[in-house]
Image: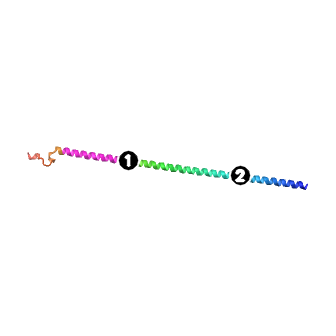
Amino acid sequence: MEEEMEEEEQEEEEEEMEEEMEEEEQEEEEEEMEEEMEEEEQEEEEEEMEEEMEEEEQEEEEEEMEEEMEEEEQEEEEEEMEEEEMEEEEQEEEEEEMEEEEEDALSPLRRPGSPCPSDGV
């Protein structure tokens, strides 16, 4: 009888130990899974942040390029306007010169050395 009791006790102890070990194993597995999930989550967050930063950078670059293009366009327009003004001034000067030449040709008073009509010559 005593031997049977001892055997039963031993069996119970072994079963308990096995159960404990299984529980521990399960806990460890759950912890590992949790850790893995957390790591994955963190990685995803980091990737998202990186993507956002890259997008922002790209947007900034595009804005800068747009601004540069606009500045260049404006400069070109200003240059064109300056050229047009210069051309207009040149044309005006040429017209004035031509008018002066015409007046000189028509008016004998303005020609040095030419007889004056009031001299009666």
Left or right for 20, reference 37: right
Residue holding disc 1: 76
The dot on residue 86 is: none
State the SS at label 2: helix
Residue depicted at x 50% and y 49%: 58
Type of the residue with mark 1: Glu
Residue depicted at x 30% and y 46%: 87
Residue depicted at x 75% and y 52%: 23
Which range is magenta? 76-103
Type of the residue with mark 2: Glu
Residue 13 horizontal/vertical position (percent) = 82, 55
Mark positioned earlier in the residue sequence (2 or 1): 2
What type of secondary structure mainly makes up the magenta span? Answer: helix
State the SS at label 1: helix
The dot on residue 29 is: 2
Residue 53 horizontal/vertical position (percent) = 54, 51
Is residue 82 in the magenta section? yes
